[in-house]
């Protein structure tokens, strides 16, 4: 018997296999059609969602979880998470900077109390540099990031140009406008060389305007400066003016930010300066100054939210905090029953006594100031739980002093996080 190998040709495959192949070939166009239809519906849905969000003025997305986490860390470090019943309502804050972009999704709720442009004379608010939007956002941002005093009446004076610089004359004009516009607080996230001054007399026009504001009971908050790694020996002007609250920067770990300027509080012959004394030694206090979540102006970056390092951010943070103090104690506002220079003196005294000093610190430090700004301790220190009478002008206001222990300081330290790769660093 002979055997031979028989090869099976496609036409000779089992009937079942042939039928399955035909079914697949028939179903393939149907599958492609369904997938194509679903993809088309997805594209149409995105377009409709975009049209709907624009029609209803809604922004899809927001700051990264890293940024919001950093903000919460700073809220915890400075005690703002303990003061949730205050938003700065009834307090007028004037931000002197590069302007403000009200089209930002976190600022679209904002209506300005007043606007001044000493750079280009434009009548409508704008920001061609971005710094002012970032600083104003620290105070009044809403929805994405949250400002620490969202209820304030906001004045904005543009005195910084698109190059990030301004003149003494222009900034002085802006400060004068803030005063005439009934500001309770002027926030100056800027600084430069001071004039030659002695015994309250100075050749610097901006310092003179700042002193006039202080004399009328307006709180002035200004940046210490960012030259800490190559320090010129003192804080920037006008933070150097005696009754100004001069602010340095702190990290989320509770350490002084490396770029924060130190203060020279000693006697010096040139330029002439008498020794500074408590509670006006410089800087007075530290506030968030490293990788601080901020708003980004359109045209400055490719995102609405980012972060910035510098004492500018720290200044805005404290300005918002002082607004909460003045809301809680309206008698300390410039038009209040106890307003004026004595109100500034009182608040500065309480800042020097109720800020969170560094571990082992017992007195003012040329870089750490009187400590980290703690809004909860500051407000509580002005409370009604003591019979101590600070001065005749504050009759009826009872004051307490809350001691800050090293244990309490350690509890508020936060661990560092990884920088957000999708965010762009704003100008310092």
Image (cartoon, rainbow, N blue to C red):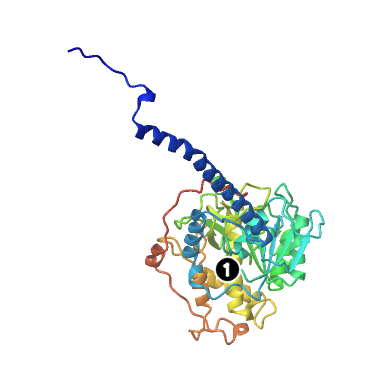
Residue 73 placement (x, y as % from top left): 47, 60
* Residue 160 visible to an observer of this rendering: yes
Residue 47 placement (x, y as % from top left): 63, 51
Where is residue 248, by image quadrant? Answer: bottom right
91 to 135, vertically: above or below: below
Where is residue 156, by image quadrant? Answer: bottom right
Residue 145 shown left or right of residue 104 in the figure: left
Q: For the point 47% across and 40% down, which residue is it?
A: 27
Q: For the point 47% across and 35% down, which residue is it?
A: 25
Residue 105 placement (x, y as % from top left): 64, 59
View extreme (front): residue: 1
Residue 146 placement (x, y as % from top left): 57, 63
Location of the N terminus (image quadrant)? top left
392 to 10, vertically: above or below: below
Residue 332 shown left or right of residue 121 in the figure: left
Q: Nearer the viewer, residue 322 or 17?
A: 17
Q: For the point 71% across and 49% down, which residue is it?
A: 165
39 to 349, vertically: above or below: above
Where is residue 195, by image quadrant? Answer: bottom right
Check disc 1 and report the residue beneath it. Answer: 321
Report crowding for label 1: few under 14, some 14 to 19, many 20 or more residues within 10 A (C-alpha): many
Q: Nearer the viewer, residue 384 or 8?
A: 8
Callout count:
1
View extreme (left): residue: 1
């Amino acid at each position: 018997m002979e055997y031979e190998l028989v090869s099976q040709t496609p036409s000779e495959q089992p009937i079942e296999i042939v039928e399955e192949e035909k079914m697949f070939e028939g179903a393939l166009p149907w599958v492609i059609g369904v997938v194509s239809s679903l993809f088309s519906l997805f594209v149409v849905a995105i377009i409709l969602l975009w049209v709907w969000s624009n029609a209803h003025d809604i922004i899809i997305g927001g700051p990264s979880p890293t940024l919001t986490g950093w903000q919460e860390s700073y809220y915890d470090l400075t005690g703002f998470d303990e003061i949730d019943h205050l938003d700065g309502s009834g307090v007028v804050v004037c931000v002197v900077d590069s302007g403000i972009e009200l089209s930002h999704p976190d600022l679209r709720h904002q209506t300005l109390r007043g606007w001044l442009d000493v750079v280009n004379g434009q009548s409508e608010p704008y920001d061609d540099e971005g710094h002012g939007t970032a600083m104003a956002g620290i105070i009044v941002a809403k929805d994405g990031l949250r400002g620490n005093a969202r209820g304030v009446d906001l004045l904005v004076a543009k005195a910084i140009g698109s190059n990030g610089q301004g003149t003494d004359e222009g900034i002085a004009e802006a400060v004068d406008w803030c005063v005439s516009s009934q500001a309770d607080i002027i926030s100056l996230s800027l600084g430069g060389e001071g004039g030659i001054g002695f015994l309250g007399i100075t050749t610097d026009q901006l310092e003179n305007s700042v002193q006039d504001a202080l004399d009328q009971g307006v709180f002035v908050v200004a940046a210490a400066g960012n030259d800490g790694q190559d320090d010129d020996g003192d804080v920037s002007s006008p933070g150097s003016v005696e009754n100004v609250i001069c602010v340095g920067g702190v990290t989320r770990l509770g350490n002084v930010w490396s770029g924060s300027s130190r203060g020279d509080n000693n006697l010096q012959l040139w330029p002439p300066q008498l020794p500074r004394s408590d509670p006006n030694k410089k800087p007075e206090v530290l506030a968030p100054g490293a990788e601080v979540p901020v708003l980004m102006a359109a045209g400055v970056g490719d995102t609405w939210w980012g972060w910035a390092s510098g004492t500018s951010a720290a200044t805005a943070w404290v300005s918002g905090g002082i607004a909460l103090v003045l809301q809680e104690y309206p008698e300390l506002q410039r038009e209040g029953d106890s307003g004026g220079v004595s109100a500034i003196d009182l608040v500065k005294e309480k800042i020097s006594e109720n800020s969170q000093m560094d571990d082992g610190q017992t007195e003012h430090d040329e870089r750490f100031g009187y400590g980290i700004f703690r809004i909860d301790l500051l407000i509580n220190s002005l409370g009604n739980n003591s019979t101590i009478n600070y001065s005749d002008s504050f009759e009826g206001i009872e004051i307490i002093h809350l001691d800050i222990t090293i244990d309490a300081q350690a509890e508020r330290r936060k661990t560092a996080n990884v920088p957000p790769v999708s965010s762009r660093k704003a100008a310092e």
